Image (cartoon, helix red, strand yellow):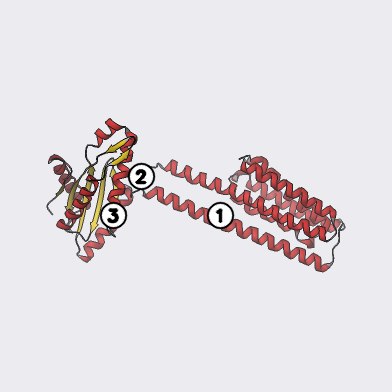
């Protein structure tokens, strides 16, 4: 079975999700700082020093938030970014008018709140954001524009704001799609592979094997089942320690995997035991392939700790007739493996079909 417990797998994926969120927020801080730098130049060219100074302050706030996120001081960084956007967007909307489109930056918070881990506060945060947005709309109807701009400048500024907001929405959406795909792939790997050896775990091997066996039965082709066991593995643990034993399992796993043909299946059956399914192999072919594996492992000692540990493996081979259930084939392969052990180990023994 999979050596990674479900709780550990869930914790790993949760950790990836949190790391992805904070990395995204740090990148947004950089992006927003670059936008403020652009607006600093724009307002300076337009001869609006007050608006330029506002963007200087905003640029400093984003730089501070980026630094805090890098130090894992996430809460003050988030509060700083919230304050910057709310105050900056609100002030610019009132001073330049609703038509400038600065208020669109408040909408970026919708996706940020939706993907954050603080789900219990999301409704409150979104309700607050809506009230601020509606309040700004009402304020611009009552308060005269402090810095009226020519229509063409207002239109250009609004289009620039719309473009920037679209880019930010597109980036955050695409970023999270990629992170979700990576988390799904990681979770799928944890669910199907053995953590120590990197081979298929027992459950997933059985799933894959059933499909291969059904295909072989339909085609009338041969298929062989093999159980392999590391010889004297307990002595390895007793003499060299469990870390060396783990290294031996990884070493043998790599050697076995390196000898597979296309279509062969290899999994960790449990402990120091491995299972192989060899489609298209009759008894002589499977025995020949296992003999090649056995010899390769025997001449490839494992480097662990301060020295080299000699390793050998015994194999039990079972050519599977179409009418033999999988469980029975495993028992017969195990019986052949037992005979290989009894005959002196480091050998291949085939069961009768």
Q: Is 327 situated left or right of 185 in this image?
A: left
The kind of secondary structure element at disc 1 is: helix
> Residue placed at 70% from the left, 55% from the top?
34
Q: Which residue is mark 2?
A: 2
Q: Residue furthest bottom?
A: 152
> Residue placed at 65% from the left, 53% from the top?
110
The answer to whether marks 3 and 1 mark residues whose Cβ atoms lie closer than 8 Å is no
Q: Residues within 10 Å of mark 3 (few under 14, many from 20)?
A: many
Q: Which residue is mark 3?
A: 265
Residue 64 drawn at (x, y percent): 69, 44
Picture quarter with the N terminus = top left
Picture quarter with the C terminus = bottom left
Measure the alpha-carbon separation of dots 3 and 1: 34 Å
Using the rendered view, name the quadrant where residue 302 is placed. top left
Q: Is 332 situated left or right of 144 in this image?
A: left
Q: Which residue is mark 1?
A: 176
Disc 3 or disc 1, which is closer to the eye? 3
Residue 346 drawn at (x, y percent): 18, 43
**Mark nearer the N terminus (2 vs 3):** 2
The answer to whether marks 2 and 3 mark residues whose Cβ atoms lie closer than 8 Å is no
């Amino acid at each position: 079975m999979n050596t990674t417990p479900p709780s550990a797998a869930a914790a790993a994926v949760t950790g990836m999700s949190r790391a992805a969120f904070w990395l995204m927020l740090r990148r947004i801080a950089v992006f927003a700082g670059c936008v403020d730098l652009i607006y600093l130049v724009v307002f300076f060219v337009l001869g609006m020093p007050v608006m330029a100074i506002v963007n200087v302050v905003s640029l400093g706030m984003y730089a501070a938030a980026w630094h805090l996120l890098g130090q894992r001081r996430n809460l003050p960084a988030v509060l700083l970014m919230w304050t910057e956007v709310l105050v900056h967007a609100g002030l610019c909307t009132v001073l330049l008018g609703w038509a400038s489109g600065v208020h669109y930056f408040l909408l970026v918070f919708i996706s940020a709140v939706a993907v954050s881990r603080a789900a219990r506060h999301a409704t409150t945060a979104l309700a607050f954001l809506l009230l601020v947005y509606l309040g700004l709309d009402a304020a611009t109807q009552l308060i005269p524009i402090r810095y009226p701009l020519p229509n063409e400048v207002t239109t250009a500024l609004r289009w620039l704001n719309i473009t920037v907001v679209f880019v930010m929405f597109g980036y955050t959406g695409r970023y999270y799609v990629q992170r979700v795909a990576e988390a799904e792939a990681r979770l799928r790997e944890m669910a199907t592979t053995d953590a120590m050896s990197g081979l298929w775990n027992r459950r997933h091997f059985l799933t894959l094997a059933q499909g291969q066996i059904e295909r072989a039965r339909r085609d009338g082709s041969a298929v062989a089942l093999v159980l392999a066991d590391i010889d004297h593995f307990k002595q390895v643990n007793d003499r060299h320690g469990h870390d060396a034993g783990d290294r031996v399992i990884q070493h043998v796993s790599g050697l076995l995997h390196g000898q597979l043909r296309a279509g062969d299946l290899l999994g960790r059956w449990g402990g120091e035991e491995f299972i192989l399914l060899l489609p298209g192999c009759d008894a002589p072919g499977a025995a020949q392939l296992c003999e090649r594996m056995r010899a390769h492992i025997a001449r490839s000692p494992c480097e662990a700790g301060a020295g080299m540990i000699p390793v050998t493996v015994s194999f039990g081979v079972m050519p599977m007739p179409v009418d033999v259930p999988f469980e029975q084939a495993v028992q017969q392969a195990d019986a052949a493996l037992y005979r290989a052990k009894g005959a002196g180990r480091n050998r291949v023994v085939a069961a009768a079909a």
